Every structure is written in structure tokens, then in C-alpha cells.
Amino acid sequence: MELHERLVAARKHAGFSSASDAAAALGVPYPTYAGHENGSSGFRADKGEIYARKFKVRFEWLMRGAGPMVDLATKYREVLTTFDSLPPDLQESYADVLRKLAEPFRQPEPQKERLPAKAKPS
């Protein structure tokens, strides 16, 4: 994925449906931001820091494609904070949703090694 493609992905991740909405929220002239998104002009690290902060993605991912898009520890904290703020009767429902979402990523339980049965004397 190229730099400008990661910028588009970051914008969408942040919930901005259009480049013009993102440019307005960033206080960047639309033609400048559009050039960054369509790849006709690159951007330097100082702009990348602003974009990464606003779009809540990792700077290293945005600028170089290194590592995950988001800081997973931050995401986990957000999920736990949301969970803790729910009334107790909704926490179990929320936990069920999280379990279902996590199911495809679940590691299989290691198989316990069975010892061969001892032969009975005849």
C-alpha cells in the first residue's frame, strides 16, 4: 500500500467519508489535502504527524506502512473503558458480542498428550 493509499485508509478509519470533510477538520486547504490523498503530491513527516494524530493511526504505519494501523494497547483500553461504563445488565451482552468477534482469532487449545495405556498382564 502506498503512502497516499494509507492516508485514505486512515481517513476512512477515522470516520471521514470524504477528503473535503477531512481537509476541513484538519484546517488544510482542500486542494493540498486532495493532492496528498490522490498521490499527486507527497507530504513530509510534520504533516504525517498531524494526520496520524487526527485520524488516530500510528505514525509509523502511515508514513512507512510499518506495523499495525492502530496502537492495539490503546484500542484495548478504549474497549475496556467502554465495557466498564456500561450498566451491569448490558455488560454480559457486550461480553457475548466481544467473544463472537474474537472467535476467528482464537488460538486452538493445545492438545494434551495422552500416555499409551499400559498393557494388562494375561
Image (cartoon, helix red, strand yellow):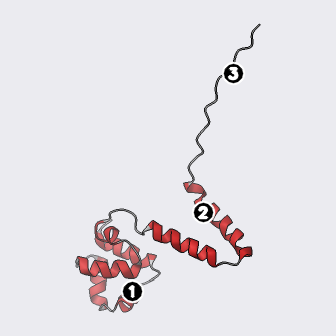
Q: Position of residue 30 (x, y in %)?
A: 31, 90
The quadrant holding residue 63 is bottom left
Residue named by callout 1: 22
Mark 2: few/some/many CA within 10 Å (<14, 14-19, 20+): few
- In this rendered view, identify the residue nearer to me: 15 or 93: 93
Type of the residue with mark 1: Ala
Residue named by callout 3: 117
Q: Position of residue 9 (x, y in %)?
A: 40, 73
The quadrant holding residue 68 is bottom left
Q: Residue at x 29, y 78 (%)?
A: 48
Q: What distance separates the C-alpha of mark 1 from that of mark 2?
A: 29 Å
Q: Quadrant of the N terminus?
A: bottom left
- In this rendered view, identify the residue nearer to me: 5 or 84: 84
Type of the residue with mark 3: Ala
For the residue labelled by badge 2, is the local secondary structure a helix, a strand or a loop?
helix
- Of marks 3 and 2, which one's residue comes earlier in the chain? 2
Residue named by callout 2: 101
Q: Is residue 39 above or below residue 113?
A: below
- Of marks 3 and 1, which one's residue comes earlier in the chain? 1
Type of the residue with mark 2: Leu
Q: What distance separates the C-alpha of mark 3 from that of mark 2?
A: 40 Å
Q: What distance separates the C-alpha of mark 3 from that of mark 1?
A: 67 Å
Q: Is residue 79 above or below residue 105?
A: below
Label pair 1/2, CB-CB below 8 angstroms: no
For the residue labelled by badge 1, is the local secondary structure a helix, a strand or a loop?
helix
